[in-house]
Image (spheres, coloured by chain):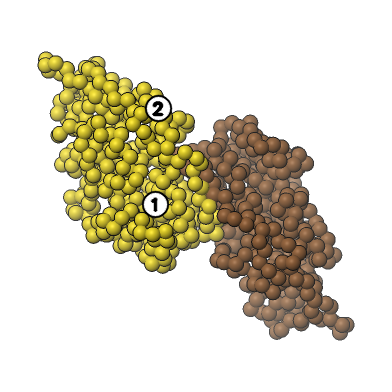
Chain colours: A yellow, B brown
Amino acid sequence: MSSIAPPVNHQIRLAARPVGLPKTTDWLHTSEPVPEPDEGGVLVQTLALSLDPAMRGWMNAGKSYIAPVGIGEVMRAGGVGRVIASRNARFQIGDRVSGALGVQDYATFSADALERNGLAKIDLRLGSLTQWLNVLGMPGMTGYFGLLEIGQPQVGETLVVSGAAGAVGQTVGQMGKIKGCKVVGIAGGAAKCEWVVKALGFDACIDYKAGPFAVRDGLKTHCPDGVDIYFDNVGGDILDTVLTRIRRRARIILCGAISQYNNTGAVQGPKNYLSLLVNRARMEGMVVFDYALRYPQAIAEMAAYLKEGRMHSREDVVQGLAQFPQALLTLFNGGNFGKLVLEVATA
Amino acid sequence: MSSIAPPVNHQIRLAARPVGLPKTTDWLHTSEPVPEPDEGGVLVQTLALSLDPAMRGWMNAGKSYIAPVGIGEVMRAGGVGRVIASRNARFQIGDRVSGALGVQDYATFSADALERNGLAKIDLRLGSLTQWLNVLGMPGMTGYFGLLEIGQPQVGETLVVSGAAGAVGQTVGQMGKIKGCKVVGIAGGAAKCEWVVKALGFDACIDYKAGPFAVRDGLKTHCPDGVDIYFDNVGGDILDTVLTRIRRRARIILCGAISQYNNTGAVQGPKNYLSLLVNRARMEGMVVFDYALRYPQAIAEMAAYLKEGRMHSREDVVQGLAQFPQALLTLFNGGNFGKLVLEVATA
């Protein structure tokens, strides 16, 4: 680091485990001097953070696919940043990196924390900073491996994806088109639906906010022969409605259930799950981290699609670290349009 | 047929679509002369019928894996019988056969109905008449293909099966042992649990009637490392409890949901289904008919296990066609102990 006064690290920490939607009082805003890295360590300035539905799960106590964020800890977040100090030969000052930076201005990693936090250099020739949080980041990897590995799409099959205008949904639908599927999105509002069809090339998109039977009727119209693959980001009533329309040997990829994450009572189980039995269909969960060794190959493939114009991305960028609590809530009311990104500093 | 007066065919027909548990008034008892078979046809005297939970589903209107039984039609039932008249070279008088005989004393098949009703000769050297409705019949085939094809059991894995003392459960658990799994049954009552362990060789059996937390506590005790495969015959609370104990990459075979078949409201969806996501697990439906071409090989294998004493079976035999409505109800209160069979005539 330079000899000028060390910068201040503003952080947002988890103050309490939320009941339902996270409230202002569930967060603690703190400041501390930025620690210099130890031998082998790296100091990263956060440029942008990924805001994801999964964050809500990380705030709950209890066993999941990843440990919960502890009370008083900096909130976990994936992000992209710039190396501003390094005592590790693999990272140079000025390198752009991605990893679990946390909701803070600066992240200091000791040597043994680099791998655990997934710190990796990113190449801005393959995609922009925000694309590295979207199609080239976790959401893109989730969509890519979830669709291809669990969904096993075949040419001519009908793929339905909920949260179609969201981060994962964008990738899923566009990958589905690349694989020769008929792709029908489900999204909230006419604007998102129009974008998904016109900009991303989906065959159709159902506006679930258009009325109580919009999804049911939309599936009848756009999937007259039924649904071969359903990529589920939302759970709840939409999952139950899709279950009534699946075809024989359908695959349902369980990626998320955003409609249920802020429940204060029990999760809504899919009452139509016996449609799986009748249709010899399966519902299978996926966690993107399982495919970490294959990210580089998938990123290269997606970057090529971006370059060729076969894949497009949209990010909804909110500015300022302090906006984190409010911005996160937009995920749960459908207020974001595209992958939600918090810009923390200018690149 | 001989020249003596034609026998009378007593039949039980579906009079109304039941709401909840089938009532006496949902059935119609009728009698008619037995029609002689046409050219190419066969007349079969029913000896024993298979009483199955799936029958409840056949009584409902609406699309399923098989058409509903029509109002006024003879109730569909699989059974075993004796050919008493034949105008088809493939069947001789005295042959023992299995097929969809229906709840009636005699079944007359035209030539084009033989295949549709699955009429096939059975070999009593391979197993008894009632075993042909159990381990060598539909329940056995369901357990065999469901476990092996969907469950993909590996040596050392932990398999849990509900309805363990029932027709499908018997086969599933014993096949699981043959495949080298640790097998834990779930059944209702101490007697069934004891039989499943002592006679069938399960490693343990949980009596779900022993208390409100019996399944939860039993799984903790008997599956301390979690559940790799769950063969579900019951749905409801037991499915939800097992979901809390599944291991990574667990497979849940959806074979039935007997706890839900007589609901007058919605089916109870598994509120813990997101455990599939966290654990990268899958839940998959199966319908035995899909494996029909492979029944002969499976029957040969199972018959060999019976002969070697590696597989045992238990049938709960109720006598008399007229007992059908009452006997069927025992399936839904757990009153039967073993595969429920209705003996219609003596062999």
Same subunit, tags 2 and 1? yes
Q: At 80% from the left edge and 76% from the top edge, which residue is drawn?
A: B31
Q: Is residue B228 visible?
A: no
Q: Is residue A70 left or right of residue B196?
A: left
Badge 1: few (under 14), some or many (20 or more) residues near its Cα, within 10 Å? many
Q: Is residue B289 left or right of residue A80?
A: right
Q: Are marks 2 and 1 in contact (CB under 8 Å)?
A: no
Q: At 19% from the left edge and 43% from the top edge, which residue is drawn?
A: A127
Chain of the residue that carries numbered disc 2 in the rendered image: A
Where residue B104 is drawn, which disc sits there?
none
Q: Position of residue B98 (x, y in %)?
A: 71, 66
Q: Position of residue B36 (x, y in %)?
A: 76, 82
Judging by the rendered image, the residue that carries numbered circle 2 is: A16
The one nearer the camera, A218 or B219, is A218
Which numbered mark, 2 or 1, is in the foreground of this view?
2
The one nearer the camera, B209 or B311, is B209
Judging by the rendered image, the residue that carries numbered circle 1 is: A231
Give the SS element for disc 1. Answer: strand
